[in-house]
Image: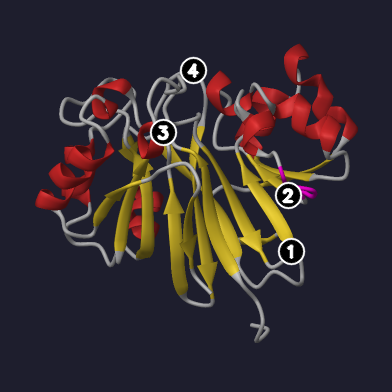
Amino acid sequence: MKENFKFKIIILGSSADKAILEKKGKDRRLRSLAILKFNNKNLLIDAGPDVKKQLKGFQSLEYLFLTHLHPDHTLGLCYILEKFPKIKLFIPEQIFKEIKNKRKFRCIKKIKIETIKEEEFFKIAPDVPISFSFLKVKHSRLVSTFAIAGKFKERILFFYAPDLKALSKESKKIFKNAEILILDGSIFSRPLNVHASIKEELSWCKNTKAKKIYFTHIGKNSAKFGHKILEGKIKAIDKRAGICWDGQEIKFF
């Protein structure tokens, strides 16, 4: 790794499918979105409907990943491709099959796309020493859904899964070794048919190597407690746990 290489994740949105705009401070949330920043290059994860506000101030965007095709993760896709026409889109083969013939996503034909075999690590550029993997997870029967993992040498730096009902066999192997887990915070205690609960996910984390466990994609069921109280509740279960907020930076190098 180059001596001056820097890498961090910036949480630009941390709500579930509906933005939470009536609150203030850390309780005010736009829909889930994250930027992976490598020195002066930016990689965007997902492209929801709040993206125009979330990317204000960003002059460049080089790479884009998609976790799945639900509207709260894709309604801003065509705006991004128009604003950053040189962006390169990396998507799993299965998502490409689902997106390529949909009229509302015909804007993707204007940009460079690289389809990726799921559950294999790949590089996005020679000057980025981190490799990535799309890992299949269970969420919706209607669309394929993936977590994203980042690895430096043998270190699994992070596992990002904003929508999650259950882990696949392969994703469990990466999940248990990741240093940072960023998981689905839609529901606090009672899981839904498309979302695991925060309590359930924390039970999965007991025997992992995670140094920190964060929850994004905060739904109304979780948000009703308020950021401070919700964070207190999850820290009482696992001291490593925390709640994401819009503007949060998670630094690695």
Residue type at mark 1 is Asn
Of the numbered discs 1 and 4, the one sitting upstream in the chain is 1
Residue 182 visible in this rendered orientation of the protein: yes
Please tell me whether residue 168 is drawn above or below residue 28 in the rendered image. Answer: below
CA gap between label 3 and label 1 equals: 28 Å
Residue wearing tag 3: 163
Would you say 70 lies left or right of 224 here?
Answer: right
Would you say 212 lies left or right of 238 here?
Answer: right
Residue type at mark 4 is Leu
Would you say 169 lies left or right of 146 here?
Answer: left
x 79%, y 50%: residue:
60
Crowd tier of the residue under label 3, counting other residues whose Cα lies within 10 Å: few below 14, some 14–19, many 20 or above: many
Residue 236 — which label? Answer: none
Of the numbered discs 4 and 2, the one sitting upstream in the chain is 2
Crowd tier of the residue under label 1, counting other residues whose Cα lies within 10 Å: few below 14, some 14–19, many 20 or above: few
Residue wearing tag 2: 63
Q: List the single residue furthest toward the top.
A: 103
Residue 119 visible in this rendered orientation of the protein: no
CA gap between label 3 and label 4 equals: 13 Å
